Amino acid sequence: MSTACISAERLTRRFPQESEVGELTVFEDVCFSVAEGEFACLVGHSGCGKSTILNILAGLDQPTAGHVIAAGKHVEGPSLDRAVIFQGHALMPWLSALGNVELAVSSRHPGWARRRVREHAMKFLALVHLDGSAMKKPAQLSGGMKQRVGIARALAIEPRMLLMDEPFSALDALTRGALQDEIVVIRKATKPTVFMITHDIDEALLLADKILLMTNGPKAWIAEVIENTLPVDRTRIELHKHPNYYPLRNHLMDFLVARSRELAAHPEMRCRDLHPAVVRPAVAASSGHAAAAVAPQPPEQACNGLIASGHICAV
Amino acid sequence: MRAPLALRAAIISLLLFVGLIVVWHIGTMQRGPTLKMDPQYAKLMGSTVTQGKSAMPGPGDMGAKIWQHLQDPFYDRGTNDKGIGIQLLYSIARVLTGYLLALAAALPIGFLIGMSPLMARALDPFIQILKPISPLAWMPLALYTIKDSSISAIFVIFICSVWPMLLNTAFGVATVRREWLNVARTLEMSPVRTALRVILPAAAPTILTGMRISIGIAWLVIVAAEMLVGGTGIGYFVWNEWNNLSITNVMVAILCIGLVGMLLDQLMARLQRVVAYAD
């Protein structure tokens, strides 16, 4: 992996509680990084603060403690370098699809002439196959088309990285599949750095290079980084036929169903250096038996215990 | 096969109108008892006493009067004898002046209140106390300080039309969706650009609703205000014709007030449709 595009160091977010005295710690000392050109998915249960992490990365929210470094700089606020694709598409309903993309383009390039802005915006609408519906208002577009406009708007400002907050969760399964395929195509074409939140394990396995697993909240943390061991040119149709698919999927399911809760109940199981363990679930080369391997790590990040099988971290 | 809804509604409207005219005509045509009197004295008395004619004008009288006004709506023969068109134009000019001044004040203050919870709280007691005051209660104060009856009337229009626009602007601005503001922030839009490109269009339907309420109130108030300040305007015209005991002219004026009020409202409704968006 090359240099980190964005990294989070010991992010903590506490919210003041209305009824009780004191604060609610949503997550604590969250550490991770996403390399340049890498696609990372964050998976975890509702309420563990996934969206808050994304908002902090975007600069829309401030952490109570810790910090985010993006492109070597401390993140203090939102930036055109980090485009956000919102869960609820967040299109301006009074603007056409083209108008929405143009608003973003003219914000990126205030000096551009109107015609140049329009051409640039049309190029990105064409990328998501919406050049035929450019003049339609969001209310006239289907859910999938609205989210495509959201994607075009984010891509059109040509950011250093994309932040996606469950972008397809409000869509039906067929539309979601089609949009996932488009993301695969766009990824191949533009190689963006992506940080995406999802609930969908198959979506994560299709799109992500690595999957960050978050424990349940409160006081959640990122416990593991799963490296995707599926081939790079995987497709949605071929995905589940690869021998590594089930080891990966089982590992993720196991984490979400049982271990995310167990780990939340036993914070002492956390590695003392606070960095997540890296796991590469795959079919063992010799026996064909599913196994999870802890990848070799730099000594300062080493986590000796087999976290993957639920053992206590012994550092 | 049924006629379209609009046509059926128009037919019912027309029938109601004809019915109204007929009832009105019958109501005003009956003759009362006449008195015998000296012809010199009879000249001083109205036709009610001498011919038993109803004091209330009938639809025919009214139609004739409207026709007479339409012949020359803009004549000006001195202080107390101006065409009804001129009077209406005076009123519309006052309403628009006061209304546009109110809009110019309400928009920025409304934005301030809508965007700053601190200023919203700080200004709230003033608004709550000033808002329920009848605009005409300001009239003596305005006449005393401004010392000009026409500007005082404009001030009264200002003060009555500012509140709906102010409160609706503040509400519209305060309830702009957080996600749209987040989009503006991630696009690094300046506060001015955010206000013009995101908040204003988002709040425009709510602001326009306030503007529509305001123009209605302003048109209601101008009649009463002009009755007080006198001189010109449709309100003054009504009062002057009452003093002339010309009930026909009063009724023509009432009809005109209604028509102009409807036109102003329709104008705002059209503007509302321009800025409306389906979400």
Image (cartoon, coloured by chain):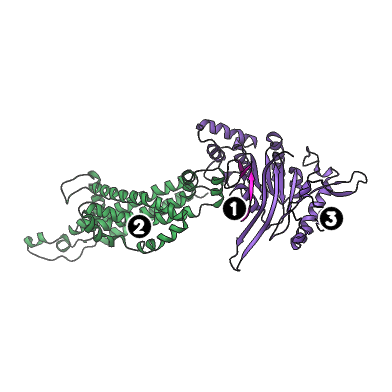
Residue A75 among magenta residues: yes
Snapshot quadrant of residue B123:
bottom left
**Separation of residues labelled 3 and 2 (CA atoms):** 90 Å
Determine the colour of chain B: green
Whether tag 1 and tag 2 are in contact, CB under 8 A, the answer is no
**Separation of residues labelled 3 and 1 (CA atoms):** 35 Å
- Relative placement, left or right, of A55 versus B147 is right
Say few, some or many: other residues with alpha carbon within 10 Å of mark 2 (under 14 / 14 to 19 / 20 or more). few
- Where disc 1 sits, the SS reads loop
Snapshot quadrant of residue A150:
top right
**Which one is in front, B169 or A74?**
A74
- Letter of the chain in purple: A
- The residue under label 1 is A62
- The residue under label 2 is B19
- Identify the chain of the residue marked 1, using the numbered disc in the image: A
Residue A213 appears in the picture as rendered:
yes
Q: Earlier in the sequence, mark 3 or mark 1?
A: 1
Q: Mark 1 is on which residue type?
A: Gln
Point out residue B168 in the picture as x, y percentages from the top left corner: 43, 55
**Separation of residues labelled 1 and 2 (CA atoms):** 71 Å
Whether labels 1 and 2 share one chain: no
- The residue under label 3 is A309
- Identify the chain of the residue marked 3, using the numbered disc in the image: A
Point out residue B203 in the picture as x, y percentages from the top left corner: 47, 50
Tell me: residue A79, above or below residue B163. Answer: above
Residue B247 appears in the picture as rendered:
no
Tell me: residue B124, above or below residue A5. Answer: below
- Where disc 3 sits, the SS reads helix
